[in-house]
Amino acid sequence: MQLSQQNALPNKTMKHLTNILRHKVGLVISLAMYYWQPGKLKQLRRFFRTYLPPNALCFDLGAHLGNRTKVWRQLGATVVAIEPQASCLKYLERRFGDDPEVTICPVAVSSRAGHTTLYVSALTPTVTTLAGAEWQEQMQKLSSFELTWDYAVEVETVTLEHLIETYGIPDFCKIDVEDFELEVLMGLKTPIPMMSFEYLSTRIDKTLKCIARVEAVGNYEFNWSLGETHQMMCEEWISGEALGKHLSASAQLATSGGDIYARRLPHA
């Protein structure tokens, strides 16, 4: 065996072990962020209790470690949790695998069925993404600490419409997929009573396209919350046009983000 080949094996093994360690640390960071902060789950329960009907069906797209899934189950909902990250899937299986009211889907959601590349950040799994280099570079500039994407894997993709055909129309669908929200919405044809999707002020052009796509699917009104506050910013729900104008104006003043909520209006 040549010297270069002899060195390649230990280097590959070392990289693998390093990624395992980074995944373990990343898991602890995510647990601290979503489960170990006093009152956070209580805040989520209070928020979603307002919007979920009895015996609701919820889709958790980008389930991560399942804090939304946990809260929805506490409120009596049936949950379909969708997550492509292997490390997160292991945790979801441990936590919810014995719950018959939780279905865990080891896939990603996109505009079409097939396969695509998942860029994995072992240390910060919340930014693991299907989005490409442009978004990753932007996130590196915005973050207060160094973000890295350690490796890429091929994952299966399904459409949101396929999930609806398989499990039924959800009462609520959360879409938190790190700059891939528009692609998810492009795979939706059936109006959903209520949904949320993440937005960033620095990516407002894509957010406006998401709003337009939701309006192309059905008749909706909108609201939004900042960061992880889970508090609606507007007392009254507003049109997509009004929300777009507000977000476009505020995007010049901040680098914040949060969640946009879309609620289907009754048929005219």
Image (cartoon, rainbow, N blue to C red):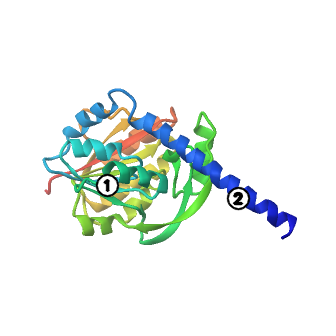
Residue lying furthest top: 38
User: In this view of the protein, can residue 232 be seen by the observer?
Assistant: no
Task: Name the side, left or right, on which 12 lies relative to 54.
Answer: right
Q: Relative to residue 160, is residue 220 drawn left or right?
A: left
Q: Residue at x 63, y 47 (%)?
A: 148
Q: Nearer the viewer, residue 132 or 216?
A: 132
> Residue 209, percent across and down?
42, 55
Q: Amino acid at mark 2?
A: Lys
Name the residue nearer the viewer: 66 or 59: 66
Residue at 86%, 64% in the rendered image: 3
- Residue 151, given in percent of the width and then of the height, sits at 62, 57
Instruction: Name the residue that disc number 2 marks.
Output: 12
In the picture as drawn, the residue positioned furthest to the bottom comes out as 114
Disc 1 target residue: 97
What residue is rendered at 57% in x and 51% in y? 135
On the image, the x and y values in percent for residue 260 come to: 35, 44
Residue for point 33% across, 55% down: 81
Looking at the rendered structure, the kind of residue marked 1 is Gly
